[in-house]
Amino acid sequence: MSPHPDRLLSPEPGVRERARELYQAVAQAPIISPHGHVNARMLADDEPFSDPAALLITPDHYVTRLLHGSGVPLEALGVGASGKSPPPSGAAAPRAVWRTLAENWRRFAGTPVRYWFEDTLARVFGLEAELGPASAERLYDQLAEQLARPEFRPRALLERFGVEVLATTDDPADGLEAHARLAAEGLGVRVIPTLRADAYMDPADAGWAGRLDALAEVSGVDCGSYPGLLDALRARREYFRALGATATDTGVLDAWATPLSDGQAAAIHRRALAGEVSGEEALAYRRNMLYQLGLMGAQDGLVMQLHVGVLRNHHRPTHERFGPDTGHDIPVATEFARPLRELLNAVGTSPAFRLVLFTVDETAFSREIAPLAGFYPSVYVGAPWWFLDAPAAVRRFRAAVTETAGFYKTSGFVDDTRALCSIPARHDMSRRLDARYLAELVSDHQLSEDEARVLARALVDEIPRGAFRL
């Protein structure tokens, strides 16, 4: 297991030589991670990771979904045994989970998961043997031994990876105690929260009323009314800003941001609390809330990230047994231009408003997102995300958006990961692919070598800092 030094830098010799130079100029640059899902409490507590499976397999739905699709039950991967819920009957022990991955390793050939995994095992842990049934036990023991050392605790790893900024994703009702501890203790990495209010947008969700109570308690604002909910969210946004937040995030099925009158929204709010809301009313309320969150962004300057186009929890039995984020979220076709027209007409040219659009429907990059970013000063093209964060898709992304929006209206790379140890592998992959794309433009005489060097550095520093107001 020895990753090739020229991986992803092009098979064409002239392009590869230029790409190698561009990549080497940024390979060791600090990592800016403006969107991700690493748990801040894990960093604050800084306890050793319990075992290789709990670190690298069980919490990573990129890994578990492919195995499940090959017939491996989630119980055999330890899913549900994270401490948030009791282990399901028959949940496998960590060593057995690792062995299951090794026995099915061939199924990951050609996937970005395999790329990240091998890069992590080789560069973070220094392992040399290829993963497979014959090496599984030996590699597990080597990993377990290293995880017991101080230099493999969460904070030490984050600093070793060269992470300068790490954004987490947090519920508005989160007290952010972990972020406060990290700031007070002087961690060498800037860990900042990101407010994600999805759970308060859909009044038809079974837990909506209970979450309003939790938000009211932490904000000190009664959320029993629609105006109260808006005021509570504004208050929490200010609290998040005080602890370093520069952005919010919203993950919804579609991008429609359609305002209701205050009276209409208030009436739906009341009916929802009484258990009388209809599906149509709940949809209208959620789309109105997206519009209201955009207006809040134009007021307080927090960058609005919009991740849309994923049908969550597609398999009901799996969701009921194991909960969300267990691999069965499925992309759907997505539209942006018409759904966002009212919001962008209201605040799209406001200097304070910033909107970063992410999609898993790559036809939307050139059809809608790049043209929107090419006109509206507030709109930025989000990096390939989730099902599109693979080498071939990243290259298609650059070709799709650059001619319309350029480089400086993109977000910079986002790793979007819960898997701490995959952060350097994911950013390294992006840097290699961008170096290749820039080298191709130079070889095609569309870009000078000097400008390509400037852009390579900007893509890992100036561009993400600017897009996310860091």
Image (cartoon, rainbow, N blue to C red):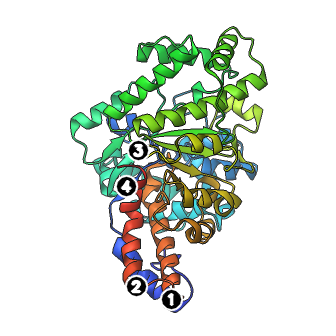
Disc 1 vs disc 3: Cβ atoms closer than 8 Å?
A: no
Q: Callout 3, which amino acid?
A: Ala
Question: What residue would you read off at disc 3?
Answer: 167
Q: CA distance from mark 4 to mark 3?
A: 12 Å
Question: What residue would you read off at disc 2?
Answer: 449
- Residue 393 image-quadrant placement: bottom right
Q: Is residue 10 left or right of residue 352?
A: right
Q: CA distance from mark 4 to mark 2?
A: 24 Å
Q: Where residue 34 sits in the image (x, y, percent)?
A: 42, 49
* Residue that appears at 34% across and 31% down: 178
Question: What residue would you read off at disc 1?
Answer: 445
First of labels 4, 3 by sequence position? 3
Question: What residue would you read off at disc 4?
Answer: 465
Question: How busy is the neighbourhood of tag 4: few (under 14 within 10 Å), some, or many (20 plus)?
Answer: some
Q: Which element carries disc 4, helix, strand or loop?
A: helix
Q: CA distance from mark 2 to mark 3?
A: 33 Å
Q: Nearer the viewer, mark 2 or mark 3?
A: 2
Question: How busy is the neighbourhood of tag 1: few (under 14 within 10 Å), some, or many (20 plus)?
Answer: few
Q: Is residue 145 above or below residue 200?
A: below
Q: Which element carries disc 2, helix, strand or loop?
A: helix
Q: Nearer the viewer, mark 1 or mark 3?
A: 1
